[in-house]
Amino acid sequence: MKLAVFFCLFCMFAVYSAQSATLYRWVDADGKVHFTDQPPPPAAAKQLEERTIGTRPADDAQQPYATRLAAKNFPVVLYNANCGEACTKAREHLAKRGVPFTEKDAGTPEANAELKKLVGSATVPVLAVGKVTQLKGYETGAWDAALDDAGYPKYAASPVKSRPTPPPTGGAPKQAPGGVQ
């Protein structure tokens, strides 16, 4: 009986520790392949591969199913800039409602061109819900109606932060002015 309990505890520990383990595969100077959970000595490895085994939890795993489904089918993009109170209220409205959204700075040439193509002008804020709905300016009732139609819950389970669009150059994401990141 004690052996069975010990074996169960050992298996639980092994499964828990394997969920996010790093595995190193390296070849030494003699051509022998090694697999270890520790990095090899710096001078010993002729060839090194590092792999993470297991799965990481999804970023949106904490969100309710309805929110995840709506975000998958109708992703929300907020085109914003430093436009004062309207832009601040727009961002706060989405965060308060718990809508995951990508925020694009209309001050950048790429987002500005995309915005002009989308709605015909560089007016901000603009809310894009999926590929069909684009709303110019911030108006609570219209925004709520568009989000309701897309299936987003009316109330947030927890506040959501925006996901800034990474710059095309591969640099660090640009900080939204006075906003949620």
Image (cartoon, grey):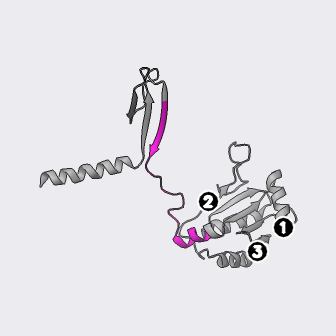
The quarter of the rendered structure image containing the C terminus is bottom right
**Left or right: 1 with respect to 145?**
left
- Residue 30 percent across, percent down from the top left: 41, 20
Q: Which residues are magenta?
A: 48-70
Which mark identifies residue 127? none
- Decide which of tag 2 and tag 1 comes sooner along the chain: 1
Residue drawn at (83%, 56%), measured in percent from left and top?
Answer: 112
Label 2 and label 3: CA atoms lie apart by: 20 Å
User: For the residues carrying marks 3 and 1, which lies nearer the camera in this image?
Assistant: 1
Residue reaching furthest to the front: 31
Residue 36, image quadrant: top left
Q: Secondary structure at mark 2?
A: loop
Q: Nearer the viewer, residue 125 or 26?
A: 26
Label 1 secondary element: helix
Q: Residue at x 50, y 62 (%)?
A: 61
Mark 1 = which residue? 119
Looking at the image, which residue is at 69% across and 47% down? 173
